[in-house]
Amino acid sequence: MTNWKLKLDSLSDPLIDKAKQVLISWVEFEAKRHQLTLEG
C-alpha cells in the first residue's frame, strides 16, 4: 500500500494532482455526511 502511495506522491502531473484533490474532497465530504448521519 505504501508503495503505490509513494508513486502517487512522486507524480507531478496536473491531472494526477486534480484527481488527488477530488479524492480528498470526496473523502472529507463522505466523512462529514457520515458524521451528520450519526449525530442526527
Image (cartoon, grey):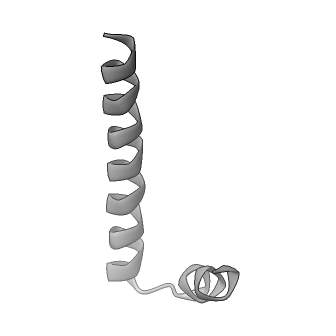
The residue at the point 40 percent across, 25 percent down is 35
Residue 15: image quadrant is bottom left
**Residue 37: x and y, percent?**
31, 22
Image side of residue 26 versus residue 7, left or right: left
Residue 32: image quadrant is top left
Q: Is residue 17 above or below residue 37?
A: below
Viewer-proximal residue among 15 and 29: 29
**Residue 38: x and y, percent?**
38, 20
The residue at the point 42 percent across, 86 percent down is 13
Quadrant in the picture for the N terminus: bottom right
Q: Is residue 31 above or below residue 19?
A: above
The residue at the point 41 percent across, 68 percent down is 20
**Residue 27: x and y, percent?**
39, 50
Residue 4: image quadrant is bottom right
Quadrant in the picture for the C terminus: top left
Q: Is residue 5 above or below residue 21?
A: below
Image side of residue 24 versus residue 36, left or right: right
The residue at the point 32 percent across, 60 percent down is 22
**Residue 19: x and y, percent?**
33, 71
